[in-house]
Amino acid sequence: IPEGTEIIDNNAFEFCNELERIIIPESVQIIGENAFSGCSLLTIYGYRDSYAESYASERDLLFVDVDTVFVYNDFECRTIDQYNVEIVKYLGENSEITVVIPDEINGVPVTSIGNKAFYRHDHLTNIVLPSGLKRIGNEAFVRCRMRSIDIPNGTVQIGDSAFYNCYVLTEVVIPDSITSIGENVFGLCYYLS
């Protein structure tokens, strides 16, 4: 959305089901009814304490502060604070089948995999999680094709539907450190025993 825009009209992006990201400038003060209805893959990028952040929060939409986002190799990342980095989105090619998420980025531990970070990357068959991981977000690995996943010790949270429809998943190692497991985490994982 161009800087200076003040209004996003009703139904402006309704049912744009492939729309993954939109950057909303600070100038936007009104977002119309159903402007992003049906945009299930959408992440709103905007500025902290902006109307866009309030809008996203009120509607339970993903929001990323543009001032904290950077790209590292095949990952879009977000600085949570000086001690934590979150993987926001995997940007790699569909030909990759193995992804190793680094333990650190620029000397800061990777502690979180964001909501929908690897959503619908159904070509991925092997994912290595960082050793300092604390949180796996909602729908983080939906429809990935890994056969097994080893969640590192120290991880405390697995979000709702984190591994939903990982239909070839047969083995998951869950550490004792887990204190919160969301709903439907392994839904449609038919071969998981």
Image (spheres, rainbow, N blue to C red):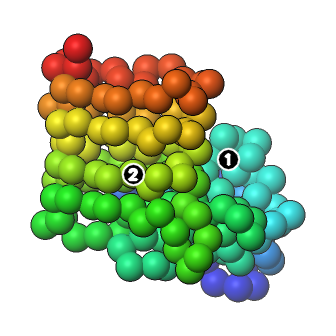
The residue sitting at the top extreme is: 193
Q: Nearer the viewer, residue 48 or 144?
A: 144
Q: Nearer the viewer, residue 2 or 33?
A: 2
Q: Could you tell whether 55 is left or right of 139 in the image?
A: right
Q: Nearer the viewer, residue 187 or 113?
A: 113
Q: Could you tell whether 140 is left or right of 4 in the image?
A: left
Q: Is residue 52 above or below residue 182?
A: below
Quadrant where the image shows the C terminus: top left
Instruction: Give x and y (percent) for residue 91.
Output: 35, 69
Asked where in the image residue 168 lies, by quadrant, the reply is top left
Q: Is residue 163 visible?
A: yes
Identity, as a three-letter code, of the amino acid under mark 1: Glu
Q: Is residue 148 above or below residue 83?
A: above
Task: Pick whichever of labels 1 and 2 is earlier in the sequence.
Answer: 1
Task: Report the residue at 75% width, 52% height from top.
Answer: 55
Q: Is residue 22 visible?
A: no
Dot label at residue 118: none
Q: Could you tell whether 36 is left or right of 94 in the image?
A: right
Instruction: Give x and y (percent) for residue 6.
Output: 77, 74
Identity, as a three-letter code, of the amino acid under mark 2: Leu
Residue that mark 2 sits on:
129
Callout 2 crowding tier (Cα within 10 Å): few <14, some 14–19, many ≥20: many
Task: Report the residue at 44% width, 55% height from top.
Answer: 130
Q: Marks 2 and 1: in contact by CB < 8 Å?
A: no
Instruction: Give x and y (percent) for residue 160.
Output: 51, 29
* Mark 2, secondary structure of its residue: loop
Residue that mark 1 sits on:
33
Quadrant where the image shows the N terminus: bottom right
